[in-house]
Amino acid sequence: MGAGHTQLLYHCSDSPVHRLPPEVKIAAMVAFTLAVVATPREALWAFGGYAVLVALVAAVARVRPGWLLRRSLIELPFVLFAFALPFLGAGERTELLGLSVSVDGLYGAWNVLAKGTLGVLASLLLAATTSTRDLIVGLDRLRCPQLLTQIAAFMLRYLEVLVGEVRRMRVARLSRGDDPRFVWQLRGFATGVGALFLRAYERGERVYLAMLSRGYTGRMPQVWQGTAAATAGQWLLASTVPAVAAGVAATALVLT
């Protein structure tokens, strides 16, 4: 429990963005994403402005473009879907590179690609500059439902324990001649999943009873949450990016 947890997306650095309290970064990311989503798809220039904002934040946070691009590949299935829209869309059609495509499908593909990519990049910047524990603390300070934050906190603490249990069960299966490559041994795999669920449930019961005996009341202690809540100046600083994005979105709505 006292050991550190693996954080695949956190990019350790000492930038001004890293030093901001987590709640202001979460709120800024959500507000920026809402501004991007509210922008009409026909306002192509607006998405260029959003991309500049994301690049500026990444530069201030000292997050390399290559790091962002590699991890943004998670949206690849949506990109493939977007490329199919011009050929599947109905309505007016036009010629593009010698192919007949739908105009509405082109706009739809651009809408999915631009907004999805900006949303993914904004989320990656948040994850790169905020540790997993701080994300949960930030959600708690933003009055996120206690049930959700507590589940996330326990998942963070015990995920590696469960992963270790899965590894030990897999080694035990292989040492007894199990080979998961064969279809007819899926029954053994399913049995292992059921056993893992029972072990996790029993472990959770024991941990919960131990926490109750130590005074747990359904909320993590203040020492875990920290005391460095955001100041008015930090809220004002973090609001600059979503404020500019909101201005761009409002302008795009008026001009379109």
Image (tube, helix red, strand yellow):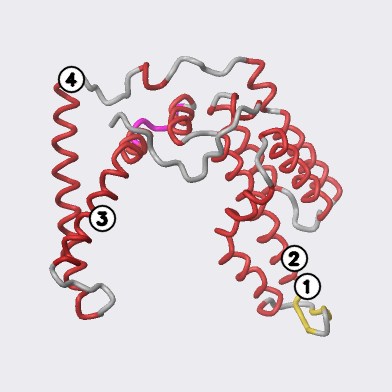
Query: Residues at badges 2 and 4 in contact (C-beta under 8 Å)?
Result: no
Tell me, yes or no, whether the highlighted magenta stretch contains residue 68. no
Query: Residues at badges 1 and 4 in contact (C-beta under 8 Å)?
Result: no
Q: State which quarter of the image contains the N terminus.
A: top left
Tell me, yes or no, whether the highlighted magenta stretch contains residue 146. yes
Q: Nearer the viewer, mark 3 or mark 1?
A: 3
Other residues around mark 3 within 10 Å, as few (<14) / some (14–19) / many (≥20): few
Q: Nearer the viewer, mark 3 or mark 2?
A: 3
For the residues labelled 3 and 1, the Cα–Cα distance comes to 51 Å
Query: Residues at badges 3 and 1 in contact (C-beta under 8 Å)?
Result: no
The numbered mark, 1 or 4, whose residue comes first in the sequence reads 1
Query: Residues at badges 1 and 2 in contact (C-beta under 8 Å)?
Result: yes
For the residues labelled 1 and 4, the Cα–Cα distance comes to 64 Å
Task: Using the image, tell me which numbered label, if any, was put on residue 103.
Answer: 1
Other residues around mark 2 within 10 Å, as few (<14) / some (14–19) / many (≥20): some
- Element at badge 1? helix
Task: Using the image, tell me which numbered label, if any, was put on residue 107.
Answer: 2
Nearest the eye: 110 or 14: 14
Task: Using the image, tell me which numbered label, if any, was put on residue 214.
Answer: 4
Q: Residue at x 15, y 51 (%)?
A: 198
Q: Which residues are magenta?
A: 143-147
Nearest the eye: 111 or 18: 18
Nearest the eye: 252 or 241: 241
Q: Is residue 21 left or right of residue 167?
A: right
Query: Residues at badges 3 and 2 in contact (C-beta under 8 Å)?
Result: no
Nearest the eye: 40 or 53: 53
Q: Is residue 75 above or below residue 49?
A: below
Q: Quadrant of residue 109?
A: bottom right
Task: Using the image, tell me which numbered label, if any, was put on residue 167.
Answer: 3
Q: Quadrant of residue 242?
A: top right
- Amino acid carrying label 1: it is Val
Q: Position of residue 49 (x, y in %)?
A: 80, 45
